[in-house]
Image (cartoon, rainbow, N blue to C red):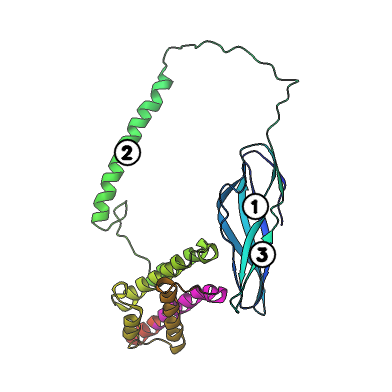
Amino acid sequence: MNVRDTLLIGDQVTLSFKTTVPKGAKFTFPTPENPITQGVELVGVPYFDTLSNRDGVMEIQTNLTVTSFDSGSYVLPPLEAYLHKLDGSIDTVTFNGGNLVVNTIQIDTTSFKPYDIKGQMTQPYTVKEFLPWAGGLVLLAVLVYLLVRMIKNIRAKRSLFGREVVADPPHIVALRSLEKIRGEKLWQNGQEKLYYTEITDTLREYLEARFGIQAMERTSGEILEVLANEKIEPKEFKELKELLGLSDLVKFAKYTANVQENENAIPVAVRFINSTYQQELEEEKEKEG
């Protein structure tokens, strides 16, 4: 465990535990009950980092952020995780929570001198005191004007300043969305179903914009039937088919994807988008030629 054992009241500290996961095994770390112990609270949910992955043997670091609003010395309870092996057996991994000392801010009593509370004093209003109110009214009027103008321009599909809004190309929108999903670390935090839902929704929106098919209203099989008639590289088509199939298993059959499948999902989607975009450019060149 790697943890700073002393902190000020209200500060946060991260408990870090390293685990070696054998090839083919699955590691799970249930979220501890809150508070972890009386006086120490868990902030958010555990998150995981893959430190290494050699020959299928992974080293995973589990991180938990805790805080305390009561000074004192705390003994953190043992924390349990589980290794699900290929033979169906489950090993329990126990982590030592360690000790945590929470200090309050000390007051220098040698230089501290108390004083009586003074009575309330009143002063006449000045022009400076009225200026913020006047400025606030002007600002409110400007905001109302901008709001009205924004609504009109939205209805006319124009920007705030009246210029026509130019939408980003579909592949840029899709790649930006996939990068956002990557940064959310959903599957690392146990949200695999949401992870695959966001990836497939991004792909469906891209397919609608790129190929003009109603992808959001079709099943994975129906989408693939339509795409079979498009000029798509066989490798990218095969990878897309596998990704959609895996997504359906996770979303509808309660299948738990392994680390490799989760890590490959976004790169497969990116390769498909880049490949079909390049194909689109080549088709435009042929038309111009």
Q: Is residue 77 above or below residue 191?
A: above
Q: Nearer the viewer, residue 157 or 8?
A: 8
Left or right, 176 with reference to 208: right
Percent from the top left, x then y, of residue 184?
A: 50, 61
Estimate how packed mark 3 is, as few (under 14), some (14 to 19) or many (20 or more) residues with alpha carbons within 10 Å.
some
Which of the 4 image quarters holds residue 64?
bottom right
Q: Is residue 273 magenta?
A: yes
Left or right, 211 with reference to 186: left
Q: Is residue 51 magenta?
A: no
**Marks 2 and 1, the one that precedes in the sequence:** 1
Residue at 36% x, 73% y is 204
Mark 1, residue position: 14
As helix, strand or loop, the secondary structure at mark 1 comes to strand
Left or right, 52 with reference to 148: right
Magenta residue span: 258-279
Percent from the top left, x then y, of residue 162?
A: 29, 53
As helix, strand or loop, the secondary structure at mark 3 comes to strand
Mark 2, residue position: 142
